[in-house]
Image (cartoon, rainbow, N blue to C red):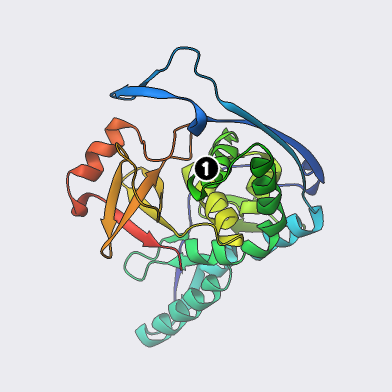
Amino acid sequence: MRLISFILPTLLLATTASAFSQRQKMQWSDINTREVVRWEGDTAILAQGATMTELQCNIFIDSNKVLRAIDSFGIPEAWTKITYRSDEELKQQRDSLSAKAHKHGIKMNPEDYNFSVDYNWVVNNSVADLHDIANQIRSTARRKGYRSRRDLIGAIASFVQELKYQLPPEHRFNDDGEKILTAGATMPLETLAKRCGDCDTKSLLFAGLVRSISLVDVIFVAIEDHLFTAIRINPSQGDHSIRHKGRDWVLLELSDSWPIGHVPENHLSVIRSGKEAYRVIDID
C-alpha cells in the first residue's frame, strides 16, 4: 500500500467570527473623476486644481452570511491524503477528490495535482450576498451625479481599490480545528468584511459586485505573478485593452488605485508582448 499526500503551502492564520461587524461606514475617493491632462508612463499629469469625487455610504454586512460563505469555500487538508492499491483505484480517488473539491470552489490540476481557486464558482456563489451592497454603492454614486455605465463601474472599482492590499492565508481552521485549504483566496463577502485582499480576492469582489446588478461583463487576465480584471465596455481614447473572442475588453487594475483603462507599465508590457504571455479566464 502506498500513501500519497497533496499538501499546499500554509500560513498560520486562522479566521474568526469576531472579526466581523455588521454595519460599516465606507468612505473612498473615485480616482476616475480627476482630470488628467496626459500620462507619462505610470504618472498621470493632472489639470491644475484637479480633485476626486468623495463617496460615502453605510453598508450592512450580515455576519451570518459571512460565516456561511466562509464555510462553503475550501477543502479539508485530510481530503488530499489518498490511499490506494492500484493505478485504477488511484484514478478513482483523484476523480472523487476533484469532484468534491469543485463543489467547494477549488480546482484540482490533473497534471500536477495542485489546487487553485475556481473563480467562476466563487463569483457565482457570491452574487446573491453582494446584490444589496452593490445597489447601495450604485445609489450613492447616482446621488453624486453619476449617470453613465462607465462612471458607475468606476465608483464600484474605486470602492474595491480602497480596501487594504494584503495577501490572504493559504488555509484557515474551522470550528473543529480542522485545517481547510483555500488556495490563498477568500470569499468576496469575507474580503469586504475584513476590508483587505490581494489582486485575486479584490478582482473576485469586484466581479461579484458588478455581476450582482448586471452592470458589466467581466473577465480575468492572468500573467505570471498578477491578475487583472477586464470589462466589456467600448474603449475610450488612451485605454489599455485586449481583444478576446472578437470583442474589446478594457483593463482594470484593482489591487491599487488606478483609473479604468490604465494599468502599470511593467504589467502592460507583458500583455503587449503577445497572447502567449497571458491567460484569459472567462467569468460566466
Residue at the far top in the pictured view: 48
Q: Position of residue 65 (x, y in %)?
A: 76, 59
Work out whether 261 lies above or below 112. above
Q: Name the residue nearer the viewer: 157 or 195.
A: 157
Q: Name the residue nearer the viewer: 207 or 103.
A: 207
Q: Name the residue nearer the viewer: 258 or 77.
A: 258
Q: Position of residue 80 (x, y in %)?
A: 51, 67
Q: Residue at the spot x=57%, y=41% of the render?
A: 155
Work out whether 147 lies above or below 176. above
Location of mark 1 (residue): 151
Residue at the far left in the pictured view: 273
Displayed quadrant of residue 1: bottom left
Work out whether 227 lies above or below 74. above
Q: Is residue 213 visible?
A: yes
Q: Position of residue 190 (x, y in %)?
A: 67, 50
Q: Amino acid at mark 1?
A: Asp
